[in-house]
Amino acid sequence: MSRSDPVGIACSISGTLANREQCPASAYAPAEYAAEARRIEDEGGAMIHIHARTPDGTPSYEVEDFQAITEAIRAEVGEAVIINFSTGTIGVPVAKRVAYLRACRPEVAALNMGSMNYAKYSRTRKDFVFKAVFANPFEEIIELLEAMDDLGIKPEHECFDVGHVGSLAPLIDMGVLRPPLHVDCVMGVIGGIPPTARNLAAMVDNIPEPAHWGVIGISRDQWMLVSAALTLGGSIRVGLEDNLYLPDGHMASSNGELIAKARQMTEDIGRRAATVEEARQLLAIGAREQVSSA
């Protein structure tokens, strides 16, 4: 990728950790996801990453919740965005994750590329806010890859460290993963690579070609990493799953506000936001096939 390429701007509407006590704009119900999708599309976002929740905000891995959210988004914005499902979780069987992929057939699905300690640390408390072991063994990675290939879903390889990037090459050699790749460097999680521009460049240098890549910056380091990715020629993701605040320290009132800032930064550096058609070209995916509900 080069700086002349259009920038794929993605948004993760609502994760599994942040809630309305932390940010009133967190989406729970399908209609709220749809309203956020409209704001995202209006401001230049081309791809939406979905973690499902029930209407009371409980994280969900049930087919019906992914279906309801997807249908609400499609009813609101049609084909104007690419839909990307999360498959990352702790303790949920692969079969359950494949079930919602098979039922809904998103164009893209995230695939975590390695196991790690996963934590958030508070310097004020001198303690971890939370900590867990995020297990993603090769057996599960391969099972998810094979399911995505069977379903015609493009994997988004979420890499939290350089070693996760290194896990791509053997999968290509085995034939279970076929380039061109779509790789996102996730930075800012304790247990993963520290969030610096130099570390981002090191991760990108290790991605097997051909590939499209982007950055997912966690917490307030997000905006520095957005700037670094734009300079290096990559794409970007923002959203209330990853970060609740604008660069000036004010809490975002919607995902659309975060996307608007990301688009402004893109234009300020001399690049431009990709249209949804251009984003599909960057990801090497075709037009979405209609899935029968029968």
Image (cartoon, helix red, strand yellow):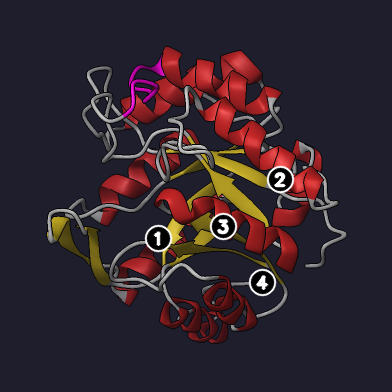
Q: CA distance from mark 4 to mark 2?
A: 30 Å
Q: Residue at x 75, y 50 (%)?
A: 7
Q: CA distance from mark 3 to mark 2?
A: 11 Å
Image vertical order of residue 157 relative to residue 88, above or below: below
Where is mark 4, residue-wise? 179
Q: CA distance from mark 2 to mark 1?
A: 35 Å
Q: Quadrant of residue 202?
A: bottom right
- Queried whether the magenta region covers residue 25, the answer comes back as yes
Badge 1 crowding class, 10 Å Cα cut-off, few under 14, some 14 to 19, many 20 or more, is many
Decide which of 37, 200 is in the foreground and name it. 200
Badge 2 crowding class, 10 Å Cα cut-off, few under 14, some 14 to 19, many 20 or more, is some
Where is mark 2, residue-wise? 265
Mark 4 or 2: in front is 2
Q: Which residues are magenta?
A: 23-30
Q: Residue at x 81, y 51 (%)?
A: 6
N-terminal of the pair, mark 1 or mark 4, is 1
Q: CA distance from mark 4 to mark 3?
A: 29 Å
Drawn side of residue 288 relative to residue 248, left or right? right
Q: Quadrant of residue 73?
A: top right
Where is mark 3, residue-wise? 224
N-terminal of the pair, mark 4 or mark 3, is 4
